[in-house]
Amino acid sequence: MSGNTFGDIFRVTTFGESHGPALGVIIDGVPAGIKLDQEQIQHELDRRRPGQSKVSTMRQEADAVEILSGLMDGVTTGTALAMQIRNGDQRSRDYGNLASCFRPGHADYGYFKKYGIRDYRGGGRSSGRETAMRVAAGAVAKQLLAHFGVKVQAYTTRLAGISAKKIDLDAVESNIVRTVDPDVAEAMIAAIRAAQEQMDSVGGIIECRADGVPAGLGEPVFDKLDALLAHAVLSVGGVKGVEFGEGFAAADLRGSQNNDAMSPDGYRSNHAGGILGGISNGNPILLRVVMKPTASIAQDQQTVDENGNPLTISIHGRHDPCLVPRAVPVIEAMAALVLADALLRNRSSRL
């Protein structure tokens, strides 16, 4: 297995590298008859694309999506849906000094030991550019989920040590760090800019919620819904942790505090994050992911070359000083892919 395919029924395979000619995705299992809004797919890609703000990489890519198959007169046909975007602003020369050495914090060394060869131009498949086609596929999944009344939304809750104090879901797309608390947006932006000036980077936390998810999604034992969601979001580069509901805070609670009491109208709380026993319980699904600081920084760093010789490097090129704002739509996309697949799987769970 090459690890480029995700999902069971709603099955996604992506291809392409950061500095190759194009990136693409093939989705099997898209039901026929969905009136696909191509502008919505482009909108999601625009949320993720580089060069969109003063706190993102200055690489300029239109990320214009082209649908190659699986669509006729704007309606899905039930056959494989294929999409691609072309790369247009590669600057491979920026990576010339990295051809024979390993960047600290990157996948370079692991790729080299696994394959004996690696794409040093931006990291190839390990680059964040790879996530573009996840977002395109996620946009299709979101439109499928809308037929079931399910909505997925992610947002920044913590960045560079600054935490959101309130939740205003309508404010997320009105600030460039995509925080749910507009009152702390400027402080978060200032923290990113300060790190930039010091040739450094920062990380943060993204929260993702899914509303309208019916009870009963997820499979017993190995394909628990939270296990699949964890697999999905942890497959995104830069994600180093995930929690559901109370998450790690549950370690300090008692069972009487952590249990979600029930009433004839449903659950009285949502400490479990909408999933119990690996199966959705009808509450909103709530998860959070930790994004590490961007590994590519312009400071001098110690490393070794392919022969094990020590050396000092600085990483040139155009890189996000913080992964969090552009990762928000990626986390949404991965959650949407899992939920779309789970909904389709669940249609065969009983007569």
Image: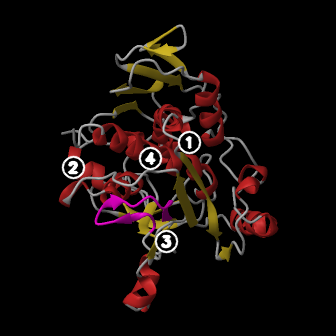
Q: Quadrant of residue 240?
A: bottom left
> Which of the two marks, 1 or 3, is nearer to us in this view?
3
Residue 114: mark: 2
Q: Is residue 181 above or below residue 85?
A: below
Q: What residue does disc 4 label?
A: 334
State how far apart marks 4 and 3 are (Cα): 22 Å
Q: Residues within 10 Å of mark 4 (few under 14, many from 20)?
A: many
For the point 60% across and 42% down, the residue is 48
Marks 4 and 2, the one that precedes in the sequence? 2
Q: Is residue 268 above or below residue 300?
A: below
Where residue 4 appears, as percent x and y from the top left, is 30, 38
Marks 3 and 2, the one that precedes in the sequence? 2
Where residue 319 appears, as percent x and y from the top left, is 60, 50
For the point 73% across and 67% down, the residue is 188
Marks 1 and 3, the one that precedes in the sequence? 1
Q: Quadrant of residue 275?
A: bottom left
Q: Secondary structure at mark 1?
A: helix
